[in-house]
Image: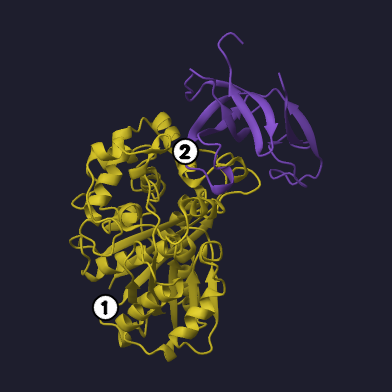
Chain colours: A yellow, B purple
Amino acid sequence: MRGVSVIGIGCTPFGQQNGVSITDLALQACREALSDAQIPTSLVRAFYLGNFVSEALVHQGALAPIVAHRLGLRPIPCTKVEGACASSGIAFRHGVLLIASGVCDIVLVAGVEKMTSAGTGAVTEALASAGDADSEMRLGLTFPGTFGIIMRRHMHQHGTTREQVAMVSVKNRQSGSANPKAHFQKPVALGEVLESRLICDPLRLYDCTPISDGAAAAVLCAADPATEYADQPIDIIGSGHAMGPATLFEMADLTTFEASVAAAQQAYREAGLTPRDIDVAEVHDCFTIAEITAIEDLGFVEKGKGGPAVADGLTALDGMLPINPSGGLLSKGHPVGATGLAQIYEIVGQLRGEAINQVKGAHIGLAHNLGGTGAVSTVHILKRR
Amino acid sequence: MASFEAFTCDACKGLFARSQRSCRRCGASAILPVNLSGRGLLTSFTTIRMPPTAFQGQEPYDIAVIDLEEGLRVTARLTVQAGRTAGIGDPVMFETMCPYGAAFRLIEEQE
């Protein structure tokens, strides 16, 4: 298998984007990535677009060819990739595989979602379609509800405190306050998180990501010729993609997502690294408790030690392992289909040394994307040359 | 007390909440309905305050993950009587099948 590098990245601001269509959002991120890579569209040999709920929320299907055609790509394979909130992590992975296997040299990958034009009930219902419709979602369970159940169990099983969980929100909102592309650019105090409105007990409003619009994209290139196009290609040295049970009742441990554990093990093995080698990570913090389960599932801390790790500052910007320096989904927003590539956008920026909240000396970065009730996860490890 | 209908594999005796053509554990094809006691313990739960459109008007409602005494884990609606507060580890029993799935309730201390 050939090596694969990122030679261009793009990302729209996340938040409410009135009057901008889903196609326009995707185009904006793709054009920025192509311009960053300084390559003409004629060199792009395939296009993967991650998206989850465009049919339900903006009544737009066939997104990949529509975006590709308006970008001026001719006539190449275009594929929409759907894996709930991991849609664009999977799109990225498919781009990597297509180049690694030698099918083509340059692939454009993107992710997009337009959510704010629909009502909260409709968005909640559309997102709930990532759960198991035959069982749990039929009961009226939602994703905030799913993570409320996981949070209560984590607190019971591991002694994680309510304050430790809330500190994830405080940390990420602080980081996001410097990010001009973030949906929320205002820090929150611990008391505000603890006193915010109950959504799904014990989960409160500031434990949740906002409903956002946004898109992100990356240009991938075979590692050998990458320097012909980019001064500083960032190499993808590990790629993992796995599934797990899609319901709470099928999880052996309500505090562990098997898909994340498996995808991480695959990525670490491919990279020949361990969690200790990672300098910076963007993890899937769709809810505060999700960041705590993620840093445990990725092996950064022992299972059950995620809460103390946050409280002790291990995961802070100036900590031993900065987690979500972009502000994470909690601050940046979570336009579901765009999230995985927005994480890649941040990690590439960190490894180039040009991130807003730059982690000093960041050499190896990790991006972790999760979809559904732990149904699917991707983990990518990237390295500066 | 109402019994809770589940499914068991005649070969490996694995228990499942849903009917299926073959056993997810051993692959055998003899899957039989089985009546369980309906008694279990609360593993975790939440209160849904912002439901999807289809459930609007029912909120707040509780959903729980329950470990039945026979070893089967299920996700179900949970009824908590007025004045009671649910806690992890509390005993529950199956109450009824609703149009949207199984409903359990907290067992009263005198039961």
* Callout 2–callout 1 Cβ contact below 8 Å: no
Residue B10 can be seen, yes or no: no
- In the picture, the quarter occupied by the C terminus of chain A is bottom left
- Amino acid type, residue under disc 1 in the picture: Gln
State the image quarter where residue A79 is shown.
bottom right
Left or right of A200? Residue A366 is left
| Foreground tag (2 vs 1) | 2
Q: Which element carries disc 2, helix, strand or loop?
A: loop
Relative image position of residue A233 (x, y in whole percent):
30, 77
Residue matched to label 2: B49
Residue situated in front as seen by the camera: A369 or B62: B62
Left or right of A295? Residue B103 is right
Q: Which mark is residue A232?
A: 1
The residue that appears at 56% across and 50% down in the rendered structure is A131
- Amino acid type, residue under disc 2 in the picture: Arg
State the image quarter where residue A193 is shown.
top left
Q: Which element carries disc 1, helix, strand or loop?
A: loop
> CA separation, marks 2 and 1?
48 Å
**Badge 1 local density, few (<14 within 10 Å), some, or many (20+)?**
some
